[in-house]
Amino acid sequence: MKRIILLLALVLVTAGLAQDLQGQKIRVGSDTTYPPFETIDENGNAVGFDVDLVNAICAKINCKAKVITYSWDGMMAAVGAGEFVDFDMIASGVSITPEREKTADFSDPYLVVNQAITVKVDNEDLSLDDFTAKDSKLTLGAQLGTTNADLATELVGSDRLVIYDDFNSAILALLQGDVDGVIIDGVTADAFVGQYAGELVVNIRGLSNDPLGLVFPPDSELKDAFNKGLAMIKEDGTLDSLVAKWFGE
């Protein structure tokens, strides 16, 4: 019996060591213009759901995360080339797609979001048919290199799509009347509606469902460790708490 107990203890210790990154510092690339996933607070610190997610996982697998602000276009270029020079991984609300999986590795999904359209309050009666009709002149804004932009192209065509470097710019263009709507994931749309209370509204939801994952270079040893940590925070309720904190769900 003692031998069985000792063997069981050895298995548990070995499992724990397999998840221990021994305090390794992880450079995390993130486009910090995408609330509530990531943004910069008044003290210049990166905050948001993805920031808390990575920190919670690191608490389980013994690592320290440093968020590095990077342009979305630059990060997606790195993903497309399979080259991660300035960061070890990406946490930035990245949708898992077959195309991206060709050149980068993803963690298990940690959240599924739906795409939505945000408009000015004066246009809250606009329907999806109003945007997609062949004779429509309505335009959509989206961020470069996103699945939002891909879907917008399917819906209205490239001629009625205006691309921006980040969603802050797209939302400002909407407020100024340069576009008629912005296609974006629903929770981020809600964050911008809260930021510009009384000016914007989310009038079309559920356009598609996108699973989100953490992104790693091909064959990175970090992937398995972060998947184990992700499983742990799912099991102990930490992930649910973060969802409730940032999305109110």
Image: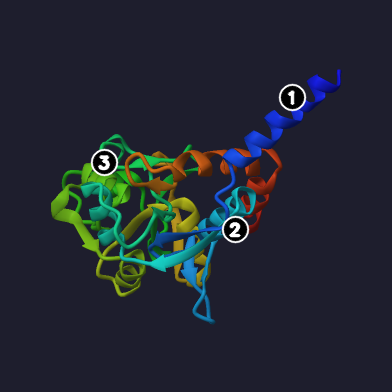
Nearer to us: label 2 or label 3:
3
Q: Is residue 23 above or below residue 17?
A: below
Q: Position of residue 233 (x, y in %)?
A: 64, 44
25 left or right of 162?
Answer: right
Q: Quadrant of residue 14?
A: top right
Q: Position of residue 63 (x, y in %)?
A: 56, 56
For the residue pair 246 and 5, the one nearer the viewer reads as 5
Q: Amino acid at mark 3?
A: Thr
Q: Secondary structure at mark 2?
A: helix
Q: Amino acid at mark 2?
A: Trp
13 left or right of 40?
Answer: right
Label 2, label 1: how many angstroms apart (C-alpha)? 42 Å
Q: Position of residue 131 (x, y in %)?
A: 27, 49
Nearer to us: label 2 or label 1:
1
Q: Visible in this render: residue 8?
A: yes
- In the picture of the structure, the residue carrying the numbered disc 3 is 103
Q: Visible in this render: residue 141?
A: no
22 left or right of 91?
Answer: right
- In the picture of the structure, the residue carrying the numbered disc 2 is 246
The numbered dot on residue 7 is 1
Q: Residue at x 39, y 55 (%)?
A: 88
Question: Mark 2 or mark 3: which comes first in sequence?
Answer: 3
Nearer to us: label 1 or label 3:
1
Q: Secondary structure at mark 1?
A: helix
Which residue ends up furthest to the left in the rendered image?
Answer: 159
Label 2, label 3: how many angstroms apart (C-alpha)? 30 Å
Q: Residue at x 75, y 31 (%)?
A: 9
Q: Is residue 248 above or below residue 105?
A: below
Badge 3, how many Cα within 10 Å: few under 14, some, many 20+? some
